[in-house]
Image (spheres, rainbow, N blue to C red):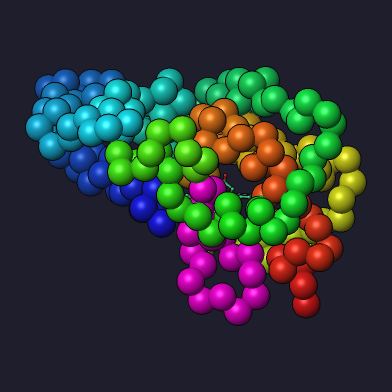
Amino acid sequence: MKRATLIVLAGAAAAALAGCAGMDQSASSGNPFETASFQSILKKDFVSKGQATVDRLQQTPAQEACSKYAYLGQPMPADLSKQIEAQATAGVVYPKDGQYMGDWKAGLKIAEDGKGMQWSDKPGTPNGGNCLACHEMIKNDPSQGNIGPSLLHYGKLRGNSEAILKYTWERIYDSQAFNACSFMPPFGANHILTEQQMKDVMALLMDPKSPVNAD
Ligand code: HEC
């Protein structure tokens, strides 16, 4: 839950700062994250602790572009969003053995687990996927989030053709392949989940026996 909240807050902070960007001389790039006032707030309020180091605040080129446009509600130039999406697509690594599906029971635990990569987590231990913080996946579970679309009955509705398996894998690996400014964490590209863990959440979405596809 925490990671999802942080992502959303980052977007909200960008939007809030846009309001005062005009007062800051260094706002010429249009990205409120680059303004001197915002950078000094970051330096003052964030410190490295354990594996959660402040270099995480360094924006990728895609995040910079999204801070300038999408997160402020401005349309991004089409060639820029296409370029970000093409780069994300080119970076996708598919399962080495060609098998997309793992164990849905392990996938459910990963989808429910919001731990990992925080200063208090032991480095090297497996991370969770926190899917349920953003997606409805299980019927009648009131604790699920709605930042992302409902994935209830995902496999039942879409089938398990090669095209759907490939699309779903790419979505989980790096959602920016489809939406340059996606809020969904790039689970493969940022090494949040291992290949096996991604297979397990694939099975959670697609396996007919998984609770996602139960009536
Ligand atoms: C921080 C919120 C967030 C988290 C966590 C998250 N997602 Fe998403 N997801 C989204 C959003 C938002 C979309 C809608 C598309 C977009 O904006 O990129 C999406 C889209 C998707 C889609 C495509 C849906 C469609 O209709 O084609 C799939 C599949 C998916 N997510 C699976 C997952 C899985 C599996 C996990 C956990 C490993 C996960 N998501 C974690 C926010 C999230």
**Residue 29 figure quarter:** top left
Q: Quadrant of residue 7?
A: top left
Relative horizontal placement of residue 53, taking residue 104 as reference (left or right) = left
- Quadrant position of the N terminus in the picture: bottom left
Q: Residue at x 56, y 75 (%)?
A: 141
Residue nearest the viewer, comparing 153 with 195: 195
Q: State the image coordinates of residue 12 (x, y, percent, origin top left).
A: 30, 48
Q: In this view, does 118 lie above or below 135?
A: above
Depicted 195 relative to depicted 26: above or below:
below
User: Total label count?
Assistant: 0
Does the segment drawn in magenta span residue 47? Answer: no
> Is residue 73 among the parts visible in the rendering?
no
> Residue at 83% across / 29% down in the picture?
97
Q: Is residue 131 left or right of residue 8?
A: right
Task: Look at 58% across and 52% down and name the residue there.
Answer: 110
Residue shown at the point (78%, 26%) measured from the top left = 96
Q: In this view, does 138 lie to the left or right of 99?
A: left
Q: Quadrant of the C terminus?
A: bottom right
Q: Give the range drawn in magenta.
A: 128-145
Above or below, 178 against 135 in this view is above
